[in-house]
Amino acid sequence: MFQNRAEAFALVMPAAVFAGAVFLVPVIILLSEGFHTADGWSIQAYIDFFSHSLNQAVFFRTLKLAAMVTAAAAVIGYAAAFAIVNLPAKGKGRITGLVILPLMISPVARTYAWLVILGRTGFVNQALVAIGLSDEPIRFLFTETAVFIGLLQLFLPLMIISLISALENMPRDAIPAARVLGANWLQVFTRVILPLTREGLVIGGTLVFTGSMTAYITPAILGGSKVLMLETLMYQRVTVANDFVSASVIALILIVMAFSANILLKRLATARNKR
């Protein structure tokens, strides 16, 4: 047993050293910038960051949009995953492939497509004017709505894939048994499907929430400078102001928010399962 563990440790060490050298060490150095001052170590940089109204607005906007995208992805994801799981094997494979297909396309290309769709001369505005719902084109771009749509389209496949895996591992007779016992579809979902697929929801929710918080291309293109989020604000602080202290503060905030979201989702799922 000791020999096997030693061999496994020896095999893992090169990858661990490489990951530590090229990832952990630079991240630790960057994060330490937010605590290091001329007088020593302090959290003054974080106090200064949250004392500005612009930073507060950007923080809460990022948190709000990430939560909204995650909630919408969960609702749509459950409906889509449930429909896909109940398809015949041949149809299930094809539809799952279509769900995975967007992940093979560059996020830049997928985001720029929304410029064509949501622009003043785009399909959406042309349709609204044609059917008489609007007399003139509506400004969709550079709004929170545009960023929300772009992020949802970007990360929805991750939620669907996670829920498909969870639903496929659920006992086949669980739903019929609940229906026979008199449960309606809302009770079936809240008391049977949701507890049995909580792990898939936690994984999908974590991926979507963290992805929505840390995505740069979509908020930068669809939101621009009018809809700043933490990741676009961090880019501005580094490239425009050369302010690595603020960038370090924002980076740590994003990391803490990501871990907090994962812990919260796990606790909610566990509490729901106990009830």
Image: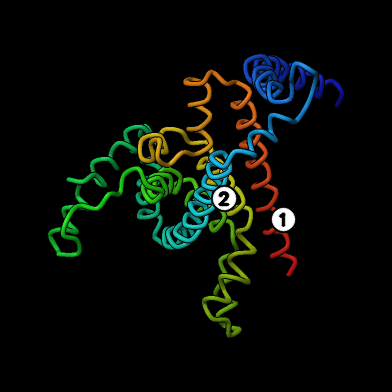
In front: 245, or 94?
245
**Pointer 2 or 1: first along the chain:** 2
Residue beneath label 1, please? 267
Callout 1, which amino acid?
A: Arg
Which element type, helix, strand or loop, lies under badge 1?
helix
How many discs mark residues in the rendered view?
2
Quadrant location, the C terminus: bottom right
Q: Position of residue 71 (x, y in %)?
A: 52, 57
Q: Residue furthest left?
A: 130
Viewed as shown, does residue 264 lie left or right of 213? Answer: right
In front: 203, or 212?
212
Q: Which mark is residue 205?
A: 2
Rate crowding at label 2 as few (under 14), some (14 to 19) or many (20 or more) other CA atoms within 10 Å. many
**Residue name at image x 54 percent, y 81 percent:** 184
Q: Residue furthest bottom?
A: 182
Which element type, helix, strand or loop, lies under badge 2?
helix
Viewed as shown, does residue 38 lie left or right of 71? Answer: right
Q: Position of residue 154 (x, y in %)?
A: 41, 43
Callout 2, which amino acid?
A: Gly
**Residue name at image x 71 percent, y 20 percent:** 12
Quadrant location, the N terminus: top right
| Rendered position, 100 above or below 35 | below
Q: Which mark is residue 49?
A: none
**Residue name at image x 36 percent, y 51 percent:** 95
Q: Position of residue 273 (x, y in %)?
A: 70, 64
Rate crowding at label 1 as few (under 14), some (14 to 19) or many (20 or more) other CA atoms within 10 Å. few
